[in-house]
Amino acid sequence: MPAGRWLQQEEDLDLDGVVGRMTGLHGMPTVRLAIEHSVEVSGSVGESLSRAIMLEEGVPVPELQVLVELADGSTKFGDFGWRDAEGRLCVVGEFDGRFKYHRESAASGGRLAEDVIYDEKLREDAIRDCGIIVVRWTWDDLRNPRRFREKILTALRRAGLLTELA
């Protein structure tokens, strides 16, 4: 029986149980690894892929959907965050998909792209004013995992979070 049909007949879809029964199929080690590292707080496919590449490339594991407390007392969220040994947020990582800035995107709230971009610039400036390094990447960066890795590691080194040549 094809796997898809077998899955549809499961009454209680316990993902670990289903995957445990699917032995010997191509790609199952990757599926198991993905499940082991899955989280519910990823904000987009791009963020999920970013995290997967970070794991594969040996980037220190970030905090997800990190809360940033701004100087004026307000708060913002960053996609990824890295802290120092004392728990201070030092680096915020942001995945930027192009559609985020489009008027049809839920993230834009129907606003013009230039308004979304301007607000994002102000948000990033406020985060940087707190002494936090902001590193951004796009789909193009994710297509080149080594370049993506180096972009993040450079930011972590600038923040003093990495001293060795990782």
Image (spheres, rainbow, N blue to C red):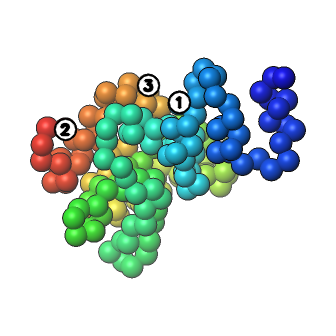
- Amino acid type of disc 2? Ala
- Amino acid type of disc 3? Arg
* Rendered residue at 28%/61% (across/down): 83
Point out which mark residue 166 bears. Answer: 2
Q: CA distance from mark 3 to mark 2?
A: 20 Å
Q: Is residue 20 left or right of residue 121?
A: right
x and y, in percent, of residue 39 in the image: 55, 52
Q: Earlier in the sequence, mark 1 or mark 2?
A: 1
Image quadrant containing the C terminus: top left
Point out which mark residue 29 bears. Answer: 1
Query: Cβ–Cβ below 8 Å for labels 3 and 1?
Result: no
In the picture of the structure, the residue carrying the numbered disc 3 is: 143
Q: Quadrant of residue 6?
A: top right
* Rendered residue at 58%/29% (across/down): 28
x and y, in percent, of residue 160 in the image: 15, 54
Q: Earlier in the sequence, mark 3 or mark 2?
A: 3
Q: CA distance from mark 1 to mark 2?
A: 26 Å
- Amino acid type of disc 1? Pro
Q: Earlier in the sequence, mark 3 or mark 1?
A: 1
